[in-house]
Amino acid sequence: MSDAPVVPVDVLLAQYNPMTLASNADRKALATLAHKSNVSVLFAQEGRAKRSGIVEYRSYLVCKSAALHGQWGCEIWILLKACFGFVGPESFTVTVEHLSIIIGEPRFLAVALKMGPFSAALVSFHASHKKEENTVQWWVHAKRHFTLFKTVFSTILSGADANVTFPTNAPSTACVGYVGAKAELPNTR
């Protein structure tokens, strides 16, 4: 590898729970919307895939965890032309060879992204609902995964349906860690 500086670039991330991606029409609509919005990485929940794997769909590589009895299933969509950085004049765009599913559970999908000097854990998850008995155990389980990822990856990109609500007097922007949302779209369901 050359002594040229490693230069990462900004990528647009989005998180979305479409409630289901079981039909081709739903999947096509989401792909069209994400592509028109130039989303580089989309974290989706309730994909309802029949099996885990990585497939090319339209202009995206889609990493999927299988649903359980037709429920849940997480997905991570990565734009094929998305550039994640440069080393000198060489650009790094994602191909299927750069991705591997490291955890594929119905409510938790983690993918390793490794290309040249760039690596990250990409995580899409769907927390259990507050009314479910296993909510605390689910979060303990998720924390174990993230604790492990922090020992392996310096970068973790994640999108989640955390199944939480915020009080009406909460600040107008959502914030996790030190990353704040610039705009919150109203829930139209």
Image (cartoon, rainbow, N blue to C red):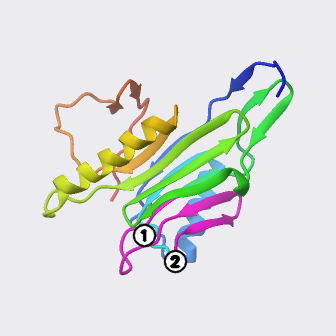
Q: Is residue 170 above or below residue 148?
A: above
> Which of the pair 134/130 is nearer the observer?
134
Query: How many labels were placed on the picture?
Result: 2
User: Quadrant of the image for the N terminus?
Assistant: top right
Instruction: Answer left or right for 164 relative to 126.
Output: left
Q: Which residues are magenta?
A: 51-75
**Would you say residue 185 is visible in this rendering?**
no
- Residue 70 painted magenta: yes
Residue 185 within the magenta-colored segment of the rendering? no
Which label number is shown at residue 101?
none
Could you tell me how far apart the alpha carbons at marks 2 and 1 are, in whole angstroms?
Answer: 8 Å
Q: Residue furthest bottom?
A: 69
Q: Residue at x 58, y 47 (%)?
A: 41
Is the C terminus in the top left, top right, bottom left or bottom right quadrant?
bottom left
Left or right: 153 as drawn, with respect to 135: right
Residue 92 screen position, x and y as percent: 76, 38
Q: Which mark is residue 23?
A: 2
User: Are circles 2 and 1 on residues that touch, CB within 8 Å?
Assistant: yes
- Type of amino acid under label 2: Ser
In-image side of 11 versus 133 (left or right): right
Q: Callout 1: helix, strand or loop?
A: loop
When asked about the image quadrant of residue 96, the answer is bottom right
Residue drawn at 52 percent across, 70 percent down: 52
108 over 72 or under it: above or below? above
Q: Secondary structure at mark 2?
A: loop
The answer to whether residue 8 is above or below residue 164 is above
Q: Position of residue 7 (x, y in %)?
A: 71, 23
Q: Position of residue 113 (x, y in %)?
A: 61, 46
Three-letter code, disc 1: Thr
Q: Residue at x 39, y 67 (%)?
A: 106
List the residue tagged with mark 1: 20
Viewer can see residue 88? yes
